């Protein structure tokens, strides 16, 4: 499968971020057509202690065409617009392909 | 579940990196006791085009105690030592907790 990956740095105001992220952003993102699975991971540290990151979100699609169509859909655009409104300076987006080991 | 996440920046020599990563590093990492699942994602770009990242690897454990024990095991130490030998300046390690959305 193909994944859209969003990695968020720790925000200044975690409580406010989480309220928007879990209360609003994930809800509109879940509505994107073609989304097969969304896996959210809360980063709690690193083997060395702290981490500068807060959340890793992985959104699974059947293939690259499905992901492209998703990003062009009204729901995808709404999610992207919302993302830029609260996390433009915190998020790194990546597109990945699962490798079966 | 709890995850150890390794995010690798794109190396200068991708072929040489992949040869070591897939031919050796993942093989010794798979032997770590308590590892439930390893998911490797090849980063191929971003919605904006390029990405500075190359691979995202997620290693799943039952809980934080299992992950701690894994990192202290001989196999875990061997994997960590190998990691530092070829990717010390490329890898970011994170510990995360899966959130059921």
Image (cartoon, coloured by chain):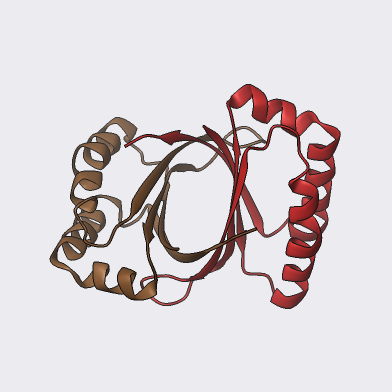
Chain colours: A red, B brown
Q: Locate residue A45, reporting x and y percent.
A: 47, 72
Q: In which quarter of the image is the N terminus of chain B?
A: bottom left
Task: Classify A41 as above or below A45.
Answer: above
In this view of the protein, can residue B20 be seen by the observer?
yes
| Front residue of this view, candidates B80 and B86 | B80
Give residue A92's position: percent from left, percent from top: 61, 51
Viewer-nearest residue: B65 or A44: B65
- Can residue A13 be seen here? The reply is no
Instruction: Name the foreground residue: B28 vs B65.
Output: B65
Q: Which residue is drawn at 19% across and 53% down?
A: B31
Above or below, B42 against A88 in this view is: above
Question: Which x, y percent locates residue A50?
Answer: 47, 76
User: Which residue is rendered at x = 40% and y = 45% of the image?
Assistant: B39
Q: Tell whether B89 sits left or right of A2.
A: left
Query: Dividing the image into 4 quarters, which one contains the C terminus of chain B?
Result: bottom right
Left or right for B93, reference B20: right
Q: Which residue is drawn at 72% across and 69% down?
A: A18
Depth check, front residue: B53 or A59: A59
Name the residue at 37% across, 65% down: B62
The residue most toward the left is B74
Displayed quadrant of residue A73: top right
Q: What is the number of callouts on the image? A: 0
Compared to residue A52, the image places residue A94 above or below, namely above
Q: In which quarter of the image is residue B15?
A: top left
């Amino acid at each position: 499968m193909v994944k859209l990956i969003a990695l968020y740095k720790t925000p200044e105001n975690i409580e406010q971020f989480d309220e928007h992220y879990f209360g609003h952003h994930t809800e509109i993102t879940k509505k994107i057509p073609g989304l097969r699975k969304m896996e959210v991971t809360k980063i709690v540290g690193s083997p060395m202690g702290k981490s500068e990151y807060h959340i890793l979100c992985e959104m699974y699609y059947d293939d690259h065409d499905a992901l492209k169509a998703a990003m062009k859909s009204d729901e995808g655009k709404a999610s992207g617009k919302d993302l830029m409104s609260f996390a433009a300076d915190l998020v790194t987006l990546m597109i990945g392909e699962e490798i079966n080991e």
